[in-house]
């Protein structure tokens, strides 16, 4: 299911009268977090029948839960309700759980006809979704540890470069310090006020001054460029990456509220090496320029991971007026008989240096209908393009974030 479920100490149960339940009461359950805040109180109050007293219950492992019936699973026009399972709580009410939650419960314990679910359960939450959690499961043990971390924190004076920390996500991190962090992102070219003034002028020129006008506040002119800002930089102790699509060994925070505990008093032995590695990386050193070199096309170097169409490995760049356009080169085949027609160019991104920063945007490929021979492609003079960092290191342009 999930080993990062929040298990509160206390829950608050509101009710509606329902004839299709064992006790005529259907429950909406919310909880108090570690700061004493009652989560989802507004929606809870709007749902419950205030004529029925609510129940404040200690969330301790309890047995005697029984599966009752299916709920939801219909659609009538705009009104769609997902499928849920009604569950009886031995304290005298019913509530609903999701089907994935039900399947997880049935994997972990036995449901006996007439007797209900065997074992003890607690209420937990994955974000805003309630999860009934078997106390015998490994997820319960892991989530208990996760919940304990939510109630502790570190302070500014606890932030010592090189020391080890545990985050509230139960990750072991080494703190490198607060430094510049370079990353590709959306950079707004106008303020919200400038956007509103532009849209108002466009509206009046098109519809007249007396027509109703409302600003979208979502269409500010922007460009995708490298943005540099101060961040707290961490590296995972196990060296794992944050994601598989764009691997990054670093973890960043603008503050330190997501840290739970400080684990060591002194810096790790290789702290200076980790720090140097960061300052030489594309995240710790901003782009200085785009450098190019001639690239020879190897038409036998095929990307084996693409089963739907053969494509050459890597990106192939061309430069026009200081703008680097990257392409992929793939086979072009007749869709009727799969006969080979030649090679096609697929544009992907444009890169350029603007005001000392790297700017990136998508290309509009107008050349896909043409099939090229190998000789024609070789004559185009493709380049190998890299981003040169201020540290002196180079990063292949297609791997830059």
Image: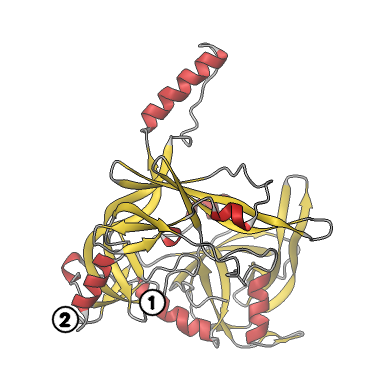
Residue at position x 38%, y 55% from top?
A: 292
Residue at position x 73%, y 73% from top?
A: 68
Instruction: Determine which quarter of the picture holds residue 107.
Output: bottom right
Marker disc for residue 338: none
Residue 114 lies, in percent from the top left, at 76, 84
Residue 12 lies, in percent from the top left, at 50, 65
Label 2 sits on residue: 266
Instruction: Determine which quarter of the picture holds residue 343.
Output: bottom right
Residue 117 visible (yes or no): yes
Q: Quadrant of the C terminus?
A: bottom left
In the image: residue 337, left or right of residue 226: right
Residue 88 visible (yes or no): no
Label 1 sits on residue: 170
Q: Secondary structure at mark 1?
A: loop
Who is closer to the viewer here, 323 or 180? 323
Who is closer to the viewer here, 338 or 263? 338
């Amino acid at each position: 299911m999930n080993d990062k479920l929040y298990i509160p100490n206390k829950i608050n149960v509101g009710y509606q009268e329902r004839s299709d339940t064992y006790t005529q009461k259907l429950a909406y359950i919310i909880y108090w977090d570690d700061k004493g805040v009652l989560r989802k109180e507004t929606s809870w109050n709007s749902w419950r029948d205030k004529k029925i007293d609510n129940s404040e219950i200690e969330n301790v492992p309890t047995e005697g839960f029984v599966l009752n019936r299916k709920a939801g699973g219909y659609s009538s026009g705009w009104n769609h309700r997902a499928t849920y399972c009604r569950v009886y709580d031995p304290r005298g009410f019913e509530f609903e759980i999701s089907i994935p939650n039900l399947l997880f419960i049935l994997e972990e314990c036995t449901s006996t006809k007439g007797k209900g679910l065997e074992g003890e359960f607690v209420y937990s939450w994955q974000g805003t979704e309630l999860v009934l959690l078997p106390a015998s499961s490994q997820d319960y043990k892991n989530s208990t540890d996760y919940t304990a971390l939510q109630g502790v924190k570190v302070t500014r004076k606890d932030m010592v470069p090189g020391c080890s920390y545990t985050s509230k996500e139960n990750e072991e991190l080494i703190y490198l310090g607060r430094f510049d962090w370079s990353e590709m992102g959306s950079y707004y070219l106008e303020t919200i006020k400038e956007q509103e003034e532009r849209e108002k002028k466009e509206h009046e020129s098109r519809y007249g001054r007396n027509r109703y006008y409302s600003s979208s506040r979502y269409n500010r002119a922007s460009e995708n460029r490298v943005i540099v800002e101060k961040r707290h930089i961490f590296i995972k102790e196990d060296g794992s990456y944050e994601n598989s699509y764009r691997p990054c060994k670093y973890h960043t925070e603008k503050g330190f509220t997501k840290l739970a505990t400080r684990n060591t008093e002194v810096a790790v032995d290789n702290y200076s090496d980790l720090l140097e590695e960061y300052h030489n990386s594309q995240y710790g050193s901003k782009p200085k320029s785009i450098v190019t070199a001639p690239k020879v096309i190897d038409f036998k170097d095929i990307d084996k991971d693409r089963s739907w169409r053969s494509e050459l490995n890597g990106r192939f760049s061309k430069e026009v007026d200081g703008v680097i356009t990257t392409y992929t080169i793939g086979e072009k085949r007749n869709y009727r008989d799969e006969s080979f027609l030649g090679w096609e160019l697929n544009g992907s991104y444009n890169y350029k240096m603007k005001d000392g920063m790297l700017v990136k945007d998508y290309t509009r490929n107008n050349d896909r209908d043409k099939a090229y021979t190998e000789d024609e492609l070789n004559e185009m003079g493709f380049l190998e393009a890299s981003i040169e960092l201020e540290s002196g290191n180079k990063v292949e342009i297609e791997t830059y974030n």
